Amino acid sequence: MMSNPINYSKWNNIEVSDDEDDTHPNIDTPSLFKWRHEARVERMKVFEAKKKEVDSQSARIRKTKAELEQKLKNESLKGPDLESMKKALNDIKKEDEHLEKKMAELAKEERLQPWNVDTLSKDGFSKTAINKTGSYEKKELTEDEKAENMKEFVKSYKNEIEKYGMFSKFDDSKNYLLEHKHLACEETANYLVIQCINYAMEEKFSLMEHVAHQVISMQYLLELAKQLDTDPRACISSFFSKIQFANDEYKKAFFDELEAFKARIRKRAKEKIEEQIKEMQENEELEPAPIGPGGLDPVEVFNSLPESLQKCFESQDIGMLQQAIKELPDEEGRYHMKRCIDSGLWLPSKEDPNTNPEDGFIRHADEEALSDESEEEEKNKS
């Protein structure tokens, strides 16, 4: 039996990653996932730009520093020139110290970035997480090394991990892992947790529960290796034999842990959706309101309308709108309708010859007569 419950805190720094899949039917799916992906990509672009800027500054400082040190070797430098050169070198050293602090901050920021498909699958990592054929080495890793190993491992073995996640029988899992022993590690479990959260957010709970079973199987295998103080790859056969022929107490502990894990995944998925909707709404509030064709803000125009007209637009009842306009003084009605057109709240029909495109009103007989006279005058002039 496992001596300690699974440590779920290690999976806190995980960000769901599948931007194109479905989510809750009551959520504006295209807007949510489009915004979520764009926001994450933009954050990554900003971060990469910071890194490039720091790298550029570092190269410039190294070059300037080397040039100054070389010039100071010139014995002919004396007096003011020598003092000026020493001051310049001292200044560049201070700038170098400041830049080193910025680089340390960026390294910390990168380490704390949530895992997602965009970061786990990108190129640029050279270290190998686990050597398929190498001997087992028990080694304490820094947080930076763990994050880098995770990214490199997923980049190399993503398809194999996902295939393992689809097995349901212990024997199938055992045989597959014996053929792919490098998957017997923490990174496999971590990636499958991301999948579980994705599936739960998409309300694909059957798939989530299926993969969750494989997560707990892997965690039990890793725990057994920890108890025996040995390489997890050496525990594959013994674990799957043990779980299939174990006593009721061991099996109960396994399935209790599985149910607890699924409950945590559901809770975390719900929290993620709520967080993302809230963040999206906050960002939308910061965006400037769209301006209508006449340069007016539709929100401001709507708020300035009489209550009777506001109700018409809220209900989208054209008949009610026409009646409400008739009840207003002619000049006031035209004023409000003109502003509604300029803000985009009301779009007069361009095809209807009886509609005045300037204010959306039906032309009166006197207006039609004036229009006819104007057209006749234009013809006579030509």
Image (spheres, helix red, strand yellow):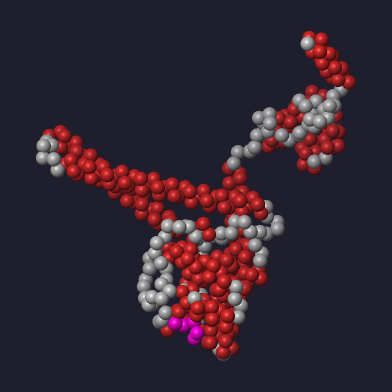
The image shows residue 334, relative to residue 185, as above or below, that is above
Query: Can you give x and y, in whole percent of width and height, for residue 210 in the image?
Result: 62, 73
Residue 274 appearing in the image = no
Q: Going by the image, does 213 lie left or right of 143?
A: right
Query: Can you give x and y, in whole percent of width and height, for residue 105 in the image?
Result: 38, 53
The answer to which quarter of the image holds residue 27 is bottom right
Q: Which residues are magenta?
A: 234-238
Q: Going by the image, does 146 lie left or right of 316?
A: left
Give the position of the C terminus as an image quadrant.
Answer: top right
The image shows residue 257, relative to residue 354, as above or below, that is below
Prevailing secondary structure of the magenta residues: helix
Query: Can you give x and y, in whole percent of width and height, for residue 185 in the image?
Result: 47, 74
Query: Would residue 169 be counted in the magenta stretch?
Result: no
Q: Going by the image, does 327 lie left or right of 20?
A: right
Residue, far top: 381
Residue at 83 percent of width and 30 percent of height:
352
Residue 17 appearing in the image = yes
Query: Would residue 237 be counted in the magenta stretch?
Result: yes
Query: Can you give x and y, in whole percent of width and height, for residue 84 in the image?
Result: 19, 36
The answer to which quarter of the image holds residue 16 is bottom right
The total of numbered circles placed on residues is: 0
Residue at 86 percent of width and 20 percent of height:
368
Residue at 77 percent of width and 41 percent of height:
314
Residue at 41 percent of width and 81 percent of height:
230
The image shows residue 91, relative to residue 364, as above or below, that is below
Residue, far right: 365
